Image (tube, rainbow, N blue to C red):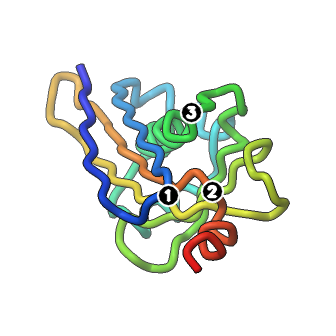
Amino acid sequence: MVVAVRYHNDEPGLTIGLGVDVEDDWASAERNLHRFGTPGELSALAAACGTVRPLHLWCVKEAVAKATGLGFHVPVRRYRVHPGDGTPQQLSVEIDEFNPAPNSSYRARVRVGTRPTRPPTAWAVAELPLCPLADERSNRR
């Protein structure tokens, strides 16, 4: 069972999506990375969050999908993660078919980890503004 509670007290009018995922199928994620992600995305996640494996990337993508409210209405490969601004736990996320403007991206705060259960469980929490970075800046003026 997973429960997420979020208290948000930032600027009025800025909606933040929250998504959580928990998985334990390590072998399948290792075999199927090419279906849902790329080695570059895995490297970007590792740079932001430390030691990760393909299952962590899957959890991040599913958490982002939940945070958008679209789920896998947008195919999982269309959620693309890139290095963030160097801030820990920050990634840039591009979401095809969700972006109102071409080449727009979202700054996602992502946390990942592994819970030492039997079998071990990978988890991810993603928070992202539900407007592109360019729109977010213009709305804050």
Could you say where residue 88 lies in the image, as x and y percent from the top left? Answer: 35, 71
| Three-letter amino acid code of the residue under disc 1 | Leu
| Residue 20 against residue 85 in the figure, above or below | above
Dot 3 or dot 1: first in sequence order is 1
Could you say where residue 124 lies in the image, as x and y percent from the top left? Answer: 36, 42
Q: Nearer the viewer, residue 101 or 39?
A: 101
SS for callout 3 = loop
Residue reaching furthest to the right: 102
Which disc number belongs to residue 14?
A: 1
| Residue 117 against residue 30 in the figure, above or below | above
Asked if the residue at tag 1 contacts the one at tag 3, i.e. Cβ–Cβ closer than 8 Å, the answer is no
SS for callout 2 = loop
Dot 2 or dot 3: first in sequence order is 3
Q: Residue at x 50, y 58 (%)?
A: 14
Residue reaching furthest to the top: 1
Mark 2 lies on residue: 131
3D distance between C-alphas at marks 3 and 1: 15 Å
Mark 3 lies on residue: 69
Q: In which image quadrant can residue 79 be found?
A: top right
Label 2 crowd bin: few (<14), some (14–19), many (20+), radius 10 Å = many
Q: Nearer the viewer, mark 1 or mark 2?
A: 1
3D distance between C-alphas at marks 2 and 3: 13 Å
Q: Nearer the viewer, residue 133 or 110?
A: 133
Could you say where residue 138 lies in the image, as x and y percent from the top left? Answer: 66, 75
Dot 1 or dot 2: first in sequence order is 1
Rendered-image quadrant of the C terminus: bottom right
| Three-letter amino acid code of the residue under disc 3 | Gly
